[in-house]
Image (cartoon, rainbow, N blue to C red):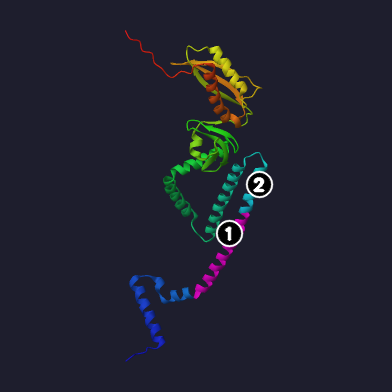
Amino acid sequence: MNIMLPPMTLTATAETAIETIAEVTGNENLKPGVIQNYLKDLPDKAFALLVKVVLALVIFIILWQVIKGISNVVEKSLKKTKIEDSTARFLAKVTKVSLDVLLVFFIASTFGMDTASIVALLGSAGVAIGLAVQGTLSDFAGGILILLARPFRVGDYIVVNGVGIEGSVTEISLINTRMLTADYRRIVVPNGTLASATITNNNGNTMRILDTMVGISYSADIDKARAVAIKVLDANEFISDKYEKVVYVDELGDSSVNLRIRGWVKPADYHKARWSMNETIKKAFDREGVEIPYPQLDVHMR
């Protein structure tokens, strides 16, 4: 048999149970009057919260668009100056990110959030992430140094000494630099490597010195070898006739007399001139009977 209790009896029973729990736990917020007041004020609080969220969202969208416009204005203004395009984009990006962070903190503060705690949390996360990506951060720092100090620009032909890399710079980003070598290979070099290396920048000069070293035997005629080398320089299509061409004894080696052959070429023709000189000087010396010796060791027996 089912027993149905009147609604008033159920309500009284629930209130009695809540009061008993409140007395046992000592929690005043569990009393029926407090709960009823909270439920009574809940629609007003929810509406006020909804209005605050909508206003915050509208403000966020408007300010985000304003920040985007400021970033574009900064980038266009910097590009009108003599600053490099990659540097202008970097500074505009830094401006946008900084303003975006400030906007997030502003929105958070409108909801009563403790921004100091957020900063501390982000700081701790930053330290952990920094330890995990030390190499990338090193490249990032190198990219900032390159963009600010500008040891080279897009289009420059650079030589990274000690690494064996050289070519024309095609792109400079925050993490790496892209280059095109003389044999048309595209390589990507980390900015951390470039920032710590000694770089030879061949841009800005209309001509570049080409040095070719060749050894002749000690029994060979130096004057004859010099005359042959000068003829090779004169016949080379990449060697300029407007500048001095010289051939001189650079050093007396263990097995040969080393001649240095020097001429001037355009930077774009440097490798072509060097390759052609190495071939033609060998053929010319063979044709004229100028010996290019092998390394040798004389042993005297007693």
Mark 1 and mark 2: Cα distance apart in space: 24 Å
Question: How many residues crowd mark 1 within 10 Å: few (<14), some (14–19), many (20+)?
Answer: some
Which quadrant: the N terminus? bottom left
Query: Label 1 is placed on what type of residue?
Result: Phe
The verdict on residue 64 being magenta is: yes
Query: Label 2 is placed on what type of residue?
Result: Lys
Residue 282 location (% of width, % of height): 52, 22
Residue farthest bottom in this picture: 1
**Residue that label 1 marks:** 60
Foreground label between 1 and 2 = 2
Residue 70 location (% of width, % of height): 63, 51
Q: Decide which of 70, 171 is in the foreground and name it.
A: 171
Residue at image coords 54%, 56%: 104
Q: Earlier in the sequence, mark 1 or mark 2?
A: 1
Residue at image coords 57%, 62%: 57
Above or below, comparing residue 127 to residue 58 in the picture: above
State which region is magenta. 40-66
Q: Under tag 1, what secondary structure?
A: helix
Residue 213 location (% of width, % of height): 52, 21
Q: Classify residue 248 as left or right of residue 123.
A: right
Q: Decide which of 122, 227 is in the foreground and name it.
A: 227
Residue farthest front in this picture: 287
Q: Main secondary structure of the magenta part?
A: helix
Residue 76 tag number:
2
Residue at image coords 56%, 53%: 100
Residue at image coords 63%, 55%: 66
Q: Under tag 2, what secondary structure?
A: helix
Q: Decide which of 153, 133 is in the foreground and name it.
A: 153
